[in-house]
Image (spheres, rainbow, N blue to C red):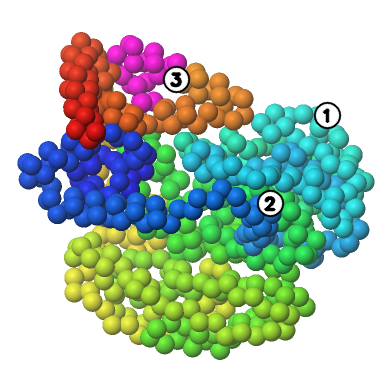
Amino acid sequence: MTDWGGSNSHTAGVAAGSDLEMPSPGLDSARELAAAVLEGRLAEEDLDSCVDRLLEAVLTVKGERKTSRTFDQETHHLLARRAAAESAVLLKNQEKLLPLKVGTKVAVIGDFAVEPRYQGAGSSMVNPIQVETMERVIGDSQLSVVGISRGYERNGDPDDILKKEAVDLAEKAEVVIYCLGLNELGEAEGLDRSHMRIPQNQIDLLETLAKVNENIVGIISAGASIEMPWERNCRAILHGYLSGQAGASAMVDILTGDVNPSGRLSETYPIKYEDTPSFRNFPSTERNAEYREGIYVGYRYYDTSMVRVQYPFGFGLSYTEFSYSDLQVDEDGVTFTVSNDGDCGGAEVTQLYIGLPESAIFRPYKELKGFKKVFLKAGERKKVRIPFDDKTFRYWNCRTNKWETEGGNYLVMVGACVADIRLSGRLERKGTTGELPYDREQLPSYYSGLIQQVGEREFETLLGHPVPDGKWSGELGINDAICQMYYAKSRLARLAYRCLTKRKKKSEDKGKPDLNILFIYNMPFRGIAKMTGGMVSMEMVNGIVEMVNGHFFSGLKVVIAGYIRNSTANKREEARLR
């Protein structure tokens, strides 16, 4: 199915296998499909296939639906606690500060300890049974809590009174548990992040706390990668991400050693934003967004180009130590042994990577192709098997337009993260490639992985066509966003833009963006026809765009005519359905 308003053409979508256009396009899209079939632009068989799949899903879900509205809330809460504990990532544990001993005097500091950021915004929001806070649950642990302080203003404003209160509290404690992270303005649905930093007032407080107490445990709440130049001020760092309704108990479980952390990073943490592969090309300044990095996204770039990072993909510490041995590689997968060499039980996430050093096509140095989480008691050894699948060795050949396998002597690697390979072997694989998709001499940056230096000519070679002109031409189209009415020729449209921008800024000044305003602000004009339940047709949208471009009366004429046709057709079809 499509994303909300994400469809440019429902006819093309159905031909490509799109079963459902979301969220509520009404009958306008249905009429579009019917006309396409009658005019021979869409095969009736393609439409039938989509209808069959959609009916199968509807009937299956309807048949499985349970009528009971009751459930075991406590069991669900415990499950949330376990999920949060198993996904939390221990990033740093200098001199084994964690787990904390029974009776350790701790100061809990940070606004997130009092009002947690436990979930994202927009479509990801759910209704929790209950929401735990560090402030409430840490008192039930065997730690000795000397006090709790918010420490900083959540919206980023400096507050000397809160800061002094936190510093005074830190001086009384053996260990500071400092809860920090991205606030609601730092990341949300409907906006792009403009940087990778957490609010500066949180960092200022951390640096001050480190001067009076060197034993600081940072508890991070954030949904995505961040810069961490401040990590030197923490002796231990536990990343809980957005840990859900039971996240506070889960973090305390790890702090006290009731749970041995076993989460691993699913993204790379670069040293600074400028190190990211898309930094030079995103965001766009006008119309185009150029993805010049190609396949070199995340660890595929950092690892291939040997860019130093803060924390690599797949990284995560444990309270115990694991060793790997006895790698065996066969045609169907790899087998190896993992041993727990420490004095407590724990889980290790073993990771399988594949590379082809002498590749004739450009590719990352290594790519994750499988992983398995295995729990081991202290001193225990287990044999682990990670199988290959149909995606392990394939690549997309853009010249033959199909998945293929490049023949060669593959490097098979097993390790604890992308930067910590413990075992490696070789496997000869037969290929299917008859025609290579790329010319090494024409794409030197892509073959080296140094894609920050990709120029326009090399990018056009990769695309296979010239880069479209991205400059504003003075005419907006249905795929331009509503916020781009800044460029509109219509004074009325520019006024609407200013009013919408003012409302957007007002909501951001409160510390929590209004997602409905953001959604409208960034929505393309075509989305109006896809998200109004059939009230607005695409014909009417074309008229609205014509008005925005300065042709008020001719555009209004199109809107009125489209409204009459759309309303008449809707009434006729609704009557037929009744």
- The image quarter containing residue 532 is top left
Q: Which residues are magenta?
A: 482-500
The residue sitting at 62% across, 73% down in the picture is: 348
Residue 525 numbered mark, or none? none
Q: Secondary structure at mark 1?
A: helix
Name the side, left or right, on which 351 lies relative to 492: right
**Is 228 situated left or right of 287 in this image?**
right
- Residue topped by disc 3: 500
Q: Residue at x 69, y 64 (%)?
A: 261
Residue at point 73%, 29% (across, down)? 158
> Which sits in the foreground, 40 or 476?
40
Residue ranking furthest to the left: 39
Q: Is residue 573 left or right of residue 520?
A: left
SS class of the residue under badge 2? loop
Mark yes or no: residue 472 visible.
Answer: no
Q: CA distance from mark 2 to mark 1?
A: 31 Å
Residue where numbered disc 1 is placed: 161
Q: Which residue is mark 2?
A: 246
Q: Is residue 119 magenta?
A: no
Say what amino acid the circle numbered 2 marks: Ala
- In the shown orientation, is residue 116 left or right of residue 57? right
Instruction: Report x, y in % for residue 384.
Output: 55, 82
